[in-house]
Amino acid sequence: MTLKNASILVIDDDTDVLTAVRLLLKSEVKEVVTEKNPQEINHLVPGNRFDVILLDMNFNSSLHTGNEGLFWLRRIKELKSDAGVIMITAYGDVDLAVRSLKEGASDFVVKPWHNDRLIATIKEVLKKKEGKKAGETLDTKSLIGSELLGESEQMEAIFYKIEKIAPTDANILVLGENGTGKDLIAKAIHQHSLRASNPFVKVDVGALTESLFESELFGHVKGAFTDAREDRMGRFETANGGTIFLDEIGNISLQQQAKLLSVLQNRTVTRLGSNKPMPIDVRLVCATNLPLQELANEGRFRKDLIYRINTVEIIVPPLRKRGKDILLLADHFNQIYSQKYMKPQLSFDKGAREKLLTYPFPGNVRELQYTIERAVIMAEGDELKSADLLFSPIEFATEGVEEPKETNLSTVEKNTILKVIEKHNGNITKAAKELGLTRTALYRRLSKYDI
């Protein structure tokens, strides 16, 4: 789970602390709830609504024993919550902190804290929860057929390849445009592998700076750099026995590539600041939106590393080349968001389905998902029409998108009308003006093409 999708509960009798945490987290997480009275735990915690709970250790100013916090920690566990609990203490008492960890806390922070350290602690707790649940989550329901959907020849070929290669330890390179679902492919490979009960760890390596790359992937020891106050394992160690997924591998520098190649060749990692190599056993899956030919440019990427990460490659097709998979996915997202927003089961009329099939989807599955979510939210009746499907103007500026090679004059005219109407957010007057038509003439064409 990512920080953006997390629900956080903060319990502290200090109003200033609650305000500070709320301001810090409100733009970082999906939900942050603050509460002064720990008695409300009995009402707030049941139902596993929260992913992480920040719990103060002292609620009575005359008693600074930490027993209040430990009492409520035990109560949270009694309520069968699977939330990770981070204890808050103003005293930094190591014995008390260790005791809280033995009682089931995930971690602790000392007041006053550095904001980046608090966020890092929350991320670490979420990561630990994901690692513990990875095997269970991926095993309970196959991603293929539930989230990874497709009946086209291209997708059937991918499913067959996953079935063949997943049980092996071959390194996999997943290629495809942004938004095509490369991360789901990686999870499905792990799910169908012999490592499914062990962690699946995803790292967006393209987002790591030079200074963070080594520490994040390989870990560090206390004192390795200014803020290294304790030993910390890296992502490779976290994934030991399981699968590590390196996303956006094409964006790392040549220097980072050399460090990664050394780890893959030696099957060991050495934490930053240490001289002790540690053996690792991981299955490697990488992904990039770069074409293989561009990746093979030695001025950009080492060929010896390409061979190391690319025992087998999977090329995920763009959505515009998957035919009626578009409708299959649209129905899937429609069902999800109809339930989420408590709408009656909506259906697509003929015009909406034709519009979905003729749009090029430069943002791929991700764009389709957001389009359907927006349409479901705004829907008035029980049917989604063509006018309800408004595609994101963000994608109109996307460069290098391959347009469908269509030469039929009627189809070209229809697609042009659709794009201009979408550009003006459904404003017929502005669309007609740009197309050089009267409003009446445009309405005739809308009727002709059942738009």
Image (spheres, rainbow, N blue to C red):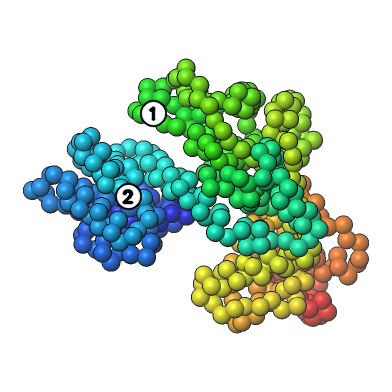
Residue drawn at x 72%, y 68% as measured from the top left: 327
- The picture places residue 222, in percent across and down from the top left corner, at 37, 24
Residue located at (41% from left, 31% from top): 232
Compared with residue 418, is residue 89 higher up or lower down, i.e. above or below?
above
- The kind of residue tagged 1 is Asp
Q: Quadrant of residue 154?
A: bottom right
Residue that appears at 37% across and 22% down: 223
Mark carried by residue 210 = none
Q: Answer yes or no: is residue 374 visible.
A: no
For disc 1, the neighbor class at 10 Å (few under 14, some 14 to 19, many from 20) is some
Residue 183 horizontal side relative to residue 159, left or right: left
The three-letter amino acid code for the residue at tag 2 is: Val
Q: Position of residue 236 (x, y in %)?
A: 53, 34
Residue at the spot of label 1: 231
Vertical side of 79 occupied by 244: above or below: above
Q: Earlier in the sequence, mark 1 or mark 2?
A: 2
Considering the numbered disc 2 on the image, is that residue within a helix, a strand or a loop? Answer: strand
Residue extending farthest left: 62
**Circle 2 sits on which residue?**
85
Task: Tell me where residue 371 appears, x and y as whole percent.
Answer: 63, 64
Q: Quadrant of residue 96?
A: top left
